[in-house]
Structure formats: structure tokens, C-alpha cells
Image: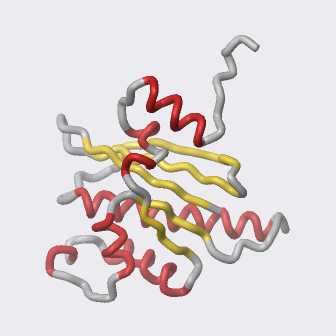
């Protein structure tokens, strides 16, 4: 199970818009894009909040798949393009610069250390969730849609 997250901060009101998509076996099963409720002090904080949301979603999805007896999901991968947020989630040292992040978001670290979730870095050029958070050119949209295995229902056959 793969979970890809992305984020874009608005210059007008500084509220970030996040987007994510979930794939199982290479098949896109759902996606979402939404504005965050709070203004983050840093992009790392905003990204980390999205990671916490992603961890919650993955845990719920894992439980749903278990109840449906779909298959055993051992480890879920959270793919991210922000190295600062990935470092915060894997570091055991709590720095002065990260103390303002709410404590309840630090359960991400617990899920990573327990092995339920693993994180993986992706280059920003290969971040597929940009389609949910940013305005893109047609070539980039086509590339991302192709990678997500989506197609236009209204294209003549």
C-alpha cells in the first residue's frame, strides 16, 4: 500500500493545501485535496501535519482491509518529497526548532519505529500529488495522470 502526499502554500493567506493519493498493488483507490485548518509556522510543520493525517488514513485503511479479509497488509509506505518532515518523523531527538509542533502529531514516529509504516523519499519532480495541489502545465498533467493510471472519460474512443 502506497500513500503519496503533497503540499502547496498559498501566498495570499499562507494556508497550505494538501493532497494525497493511496494505491494498492499499483492501483489508485482514492485521493483527496483539501486546505489545512491552521497556518503553519514552517513548511516542515505543514508537511509533518500532512504526514500525521496520512498515518491516520493508512491505519484506518489497514484495519478496513483486515476486517474485509482482503489480504494481510504488513507494512505501508508513505512516499514524501519533504526531507525536513521525513527527518523529524525518523529522528529521536526533539529539537528546539520543532517543539511547537503539537505532541499528538508525533505518533507518526511511533508508527515508523514499530514498523507499521515506512517512509520513502521521492524527488519533487516525481511527486504525483502535485496534480491535487498546484496549477500545472498540460504536459505535466498528462505525465502525472499516466503515472496514476487515470484517463479522461470524455475522450472519444
Q: How many marks?
A: 0
Q: Where residue 120 sits: x, y (%)? A: 47, 67
What colouring method underlies this structural image?
secondary structure
Residue furthest to the left: 96
Residue under the point 55% across and 49% down: 21
Residue furthest to the top: 156
Residue under the point 27% across and 63% down: 45
Residue furthest to the right: 69
Q: Is residue 27 left or right of residue 130?
A: right
Is residue 157 or residue 132 the one in the foreground? 157
Q: Where residue 84 sits: x, y (%)? A: 28, 67
Is residue 140 or residue 73 the one in the foreground? 140
Q: Is residue 19 above or below residue 47?
A: above
Q: Where residue 88 sits: x, y (%)? A: 31, 75
Residue under the point 33% across and 88% down: 92
Is residue 154 or residue 38 the one in the foreground? 154
Residue 76 occupies quadrant: bottom right
Q: Is residue 11 above or below residue 72?
A: above
Residue 77 occupies quadrant: bottom right
Q: Is residue 92 above or below residue 29?
A: below
Q: Quadrant of the C terminus?
A: top right
Q: Quadrant of the N terminus?
A: bottom right
Residue under the point 60% across and 53% down: 22
Q: Where residue 104 sits: x, y (%)? A: 38, 75
Amino acid at each position: 500500500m502506497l500513500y503519496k502526499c503533497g503540499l502547496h502554500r498559498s501566498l495570499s493567506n499562507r494556508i497550505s493545501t494538501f493532497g494525497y493519493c493511496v494505491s494498492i498493488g499499483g492501483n489508485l483507490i482514492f485521493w483527496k485535496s483539501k486546505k489545512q485548518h491552521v497556518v503553519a509556522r514552517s513548511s516542515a510543520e505543514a508537511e509533518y501535519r500532512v504526514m500525521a493525517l496520512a498515518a491516520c488514513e493508512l491505519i484506518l485503511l489497514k484495519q478496513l482491509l483486515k476486517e474485509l479479509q482482503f489480504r494481510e497488509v504488513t507494512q505501508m509506505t508513505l512516499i514524501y518529497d519533504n526531507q525536513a518532515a521525513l527527518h523529524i518523523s525518523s529522528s529521536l531527538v526533539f529539537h528546539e526548532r520543532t517543539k511547537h509542533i503539537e505532541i499528538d502529531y508525533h505518533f507518526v514516529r511511533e508508527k515508523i519505529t514499530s514498523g507499521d509504516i515506512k517512509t520513502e523519499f521521492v524527488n519533487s519532480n516525481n511527486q504525483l500529488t502535485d496534480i491535487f495541489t498546484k496549477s500545472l502545465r498540460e504536459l505535466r498533467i498528462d505525465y502525472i495522470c499516466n503515472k496514476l493510471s487515470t484517463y479522461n472519460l470524455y475522450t472519444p474512443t
